[in-house]
Amino acid sequence: MQLIRGIHNIQPEHHGCVLTIGNFDGVHLGHKQVIQALIKQAKELNCTAAVMVFEPQPQELFSPETAPARLCRLRDKYTLLKSLGVERLICVNFNAKFATQSAENFIKELLVNKLGIKSLIVGDDFRFGKNREGNYEMLRKAGKTSHFNVSDTASYKILDQRISSTEIRQALETDDLEQAEVMLGRPYSIIGRVFHGDKRGRQLGFPTANVKLKRRVSPVNGVYVVKVKTNLGLYFGVANIGSRPTVSGIRQQLEVHIFDFDSDLYGQTIEVVLLKKLRKEMKFDSLSDLTNQIAIDSELASQYVAELST
């Protein structure tokens, strides 16, 4: 799949495509439905199936303190969208200049002149342009004059429940991993590169592989039984996701103690799949109390893994 970073990198050969626009956070089953419609239209019109996303996501620019936690990073979106058959991902830098352009300019300059869209799929609540003046009806009218089709992303339901990134976040916040999996179409996981931490876990007798959660707020927090996918194989373990209050941690990160594992993962990308939540993250009075609790967590996680195998 081709990745275009920034409007300035859109070239004449990219002219002519079927496009959908959105956050696509989590790339869940509702998104999959939209992508299937996108690819079908692209084949019918003999052109490229393209997805446009914004970085940062609009809410992260307008209200960074209250923006929702991301379900996945841009890198993960790329991988998931590629697996669904998307041919081109256009990542637009969502900054103040872009956000304050007129809705008419967005349509004329970007959608028509630069991309030459043949068809557009967006939610009927899609708003764009300065003061969010652009809407679905404006796109429909523009489509008639500029010769592109516009269709809306009908809500996709499973058992009469609407699937959305918001619903998935709520399921994760209430520790309903099963419901989140139903809506995602896969278990919720965190993917990242292992970095050198302070080695405190090793000192406590429970070495961990540490993954930074960067600037994004995690939609999950606490201690979980996990499955860890590495380039050395598949393992189980216990993970803490949070800010590590006992050791005065500041940034959010994932620390996973992998069972029966003694190899070097530094610099490698791992995927940590959440299987069951054991407890919330807690602040302990001493490292001794923390060590005792980690031993209890590890035992509970081991018992859960043993039950899975039977």
Image: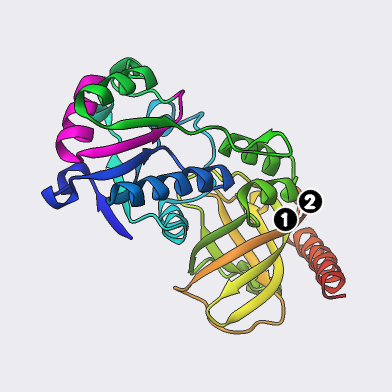
211 lies left or right of 168: left
| Pointer 2 local density, CA inside 10 Å: few below 14, some 14–19, many at least 20 | few
Q: Residue furthest front?
A: 44
In 3D space, how far apart are the residues under numbered discs 1 and 2 (Cα atoms)?
5 Å
Q: Which quarter of the rendered picture does the N terminus lie within?
A: bottom left
* Percent position of residue 95, x then y: 28, 33
Front-lying residue, 109 or 229: 109
Q: Amino acid at mark 1?
A: Val
For marks 1 and 2 on the same chain, the one whose residue lies earlier in the sequence:
1
Residue ID at (13%, 49%): 11
* Percent position of residue 120, x then y: 34, 35
| Pointer 1 local density, CA inside 10 Å: few below 14, some 14–19, many at least 20 | many
- Up the image or down, 88 lies above or below 266; here it is above
Q: Is residue 110 part of the magenta span, yes or no?
A: yes
Q: Which residue is mark 1?
A: 223
Q: Is residue 120 part of the magenta span, yes or no?
A: yes
* Percent position of residue 280, x then y: 75, 47
Front-lying residue, 129 or 148: 148
Front-lying residue, 156 or 307: 156
The answer to whether residue 107 of the structure is visible from this angle is: yes
Q: Which residue is mark 2?
A: 279
- Up the image or down, 115 lies above or below 213; here it is above
Label 1 SS: strand
110 lies left or right of 60: left
* Percent position of residue 236, x then y: 71, 72
Q: Which quarter of the rendered picture does the C terminus lie within?
A: bottom right
Magenta span: 103-125
Do labels 1 and 2 touch, CB within 8 Å? yes
Residue ID at (81%, 64%): 292
Residue ID at (75%, 51%): 284
Q: Amino acid at mark 2?
A: Arg
Front-lying residue, 63 or 85: 85
